[in-house]
Amino acid sequence: MNKIAALFLFAVIMFSGCGKEDVQYADPISGKWKARWELMNPVMHDFFQDEQRIMDGEVFFYMNQAKIRAFGFEGCAFKTDTSENILHFKKENGMLKLIDSDDDVIFSYLIANESDDLLKLLLMEDISLTLTR
């Protein structure tokens, strides 16, 4: 009986912090990030006003998944509404790859800058994605 109580106590201690956003993760990219997508291509400046070339959102990395919320709006160059997606991600060779459930790479971002509270990503030199904590 004491073994069961000890196992129960161990399980409660181990799982008591699950689901909290301030949990420390083994991978520095893990956790919740504020996101800002921005069109960098100068050609797009002719088609969209400054505020239309920017879209904010959130990204939550956990294990090998990325939950992405993009807050589009009317006139936005990226999306006209809010969307949410869950993709797999992989960091390798200076790239952050977002992968769908069929194991197809959807986006392959170049990691331009990475620290504990900033992640600057580039997509084909046309789109920048800045993640901050």
Image (cartoon, rainbow, N blue to C red):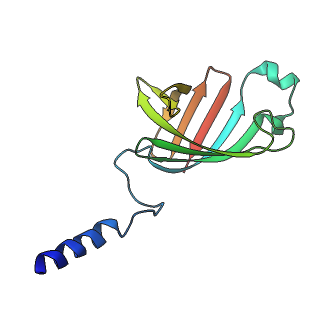
The residue under the point 69% across, 45% down is 83
The reply to whether residue 70 is visible in this rendering is: no
Compared to residue 20, the image places residue 73 above or below, namely above
Q: Please tell me which residue lies in front, 90 or 44.
A: 90
The number of discs equals 0
Q: Position of residue 119 (x, y in %)?
A: 52, 38
Above or below, 131 against 96 in this view is below
Q: Residue at x 82, y 37 (%)?
A: 52
| Rendered location of residue 81, percent (x, y) | 78, 45
Residue 25, can we see it?
Answer: yes
| Residue 115 in the image, given as x and y percentages of width and height | 46, 41
Give me the residue at 81% from left, 44% from top: 73
The quarter in which the N terminus is drawn is bottom left
Which quadrant of the view contains residue 75?
top right
Q: Position of residue 111 (x, y in %)?
A: 50, 29
Of residues 76 and 66, the one nearer the viewer is 66
Q: Is residue 49 above or below residue 45?
A: below
Q: Quadrant of residue 126?
A: top right
